[in-house]
Amino acid sequence: MKKNLLAVAVLCALSCGAALAQQAEGPWMVRARAVHLDSANKDSTGLGLSVNDKTIPEVDITYFFNKNIAAELVLTVPQKHTISAGATGIGSLKHLPPTLLLQYHFDAPGFRPYVGAGLNYTRFSSVRFDPAVAAALNPSIDKNSFGAALQVGVDIPLAKNLYLNVDVKKVFIKTDVYSFGAKAGTFKVDPVLVGVGLGWRF
């Protein structure tokens, strides 16, 4: 009888401890990642437009509504890219792509996988074309892009409130391209972003 009571008491203590540990983490999580941006570069203008792939810094802020549902805001600084037509560089631009995602975090022992979906807004700025290209085509682009974003990732506990994060996103980014004011086609960046970083839950 005493052994049974002791077993129940230990089980209750462990359950309460786990619940308190989960509550102690708090609803906020901040992650910092190094992210490799791999562009799809789909172009309907006939010029073979592309932007270069690169590794960029990324910071996200996540709020947990409960243990499974969270919202994540993904941020970075404006990123400069070279614009190419075929293998020839013809200019450059910067893009700023904040993304808001709604996530579902799965219950799993030892690690915390999640999936997400949401909306990306990209602002193109500092668009520059080489003088010869500017004179021949007078090119311009639409500087605003709205598109879907999809995500899958995992947080792996390293220490109290500290996690290793691995994250993959597909973001749909496009812009219309104009020549002398007439639409010449659409350029789709549509990158896959693969990131690794650290997260802090509080």
Image: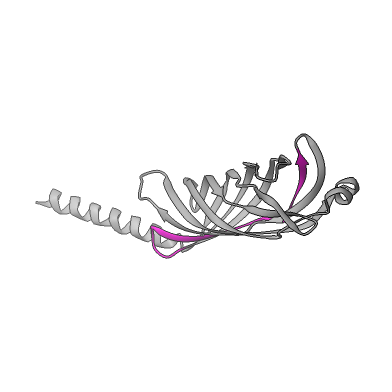
Where is residue 82 drawn, in percent x and y? 78, 44
Confirm whether residue 77 shows in the render. no
Toward the top, the furthest residue is: 87
Confirm whether residue 85 shows in the render. yes
**Residue displayed at 65% across by 42% down:** 41
Residue 196 vs residue 143: left or right?
A: left
In front of the other: 25 or 103: 103
Is 19 part of what is drawn in magenta?
A: no
Colour mapping used in the image: one colour
Where is residue 49 drawn, in percent x and y? 72, 42
In front of the other: 98 or 23: 98
Number of marks in the rendered image: 0
Where is residue 192 drawn, in percent x and y? 58, 43
Residue 34 location, quadrant: top right
Magenta residues span: 64-85
Q: Main secondary structure of the magenta part?
A: strand
**Residue displayed at 42% across by 65% down:** 65
Indicate whether 96 appears above or below 191.
below
Residue 165 vs residue 113: left or right?
A: right
In front of the other: 3 or 154: 154
Where is residue 191 drawn, in percent x and y? 61, 45
Indicate whether 147 appears above or below 33.
below
Residue 43 vs residue 117: left or right?
A: right
Is 75 part of what is drawn in magenta?
A: yes
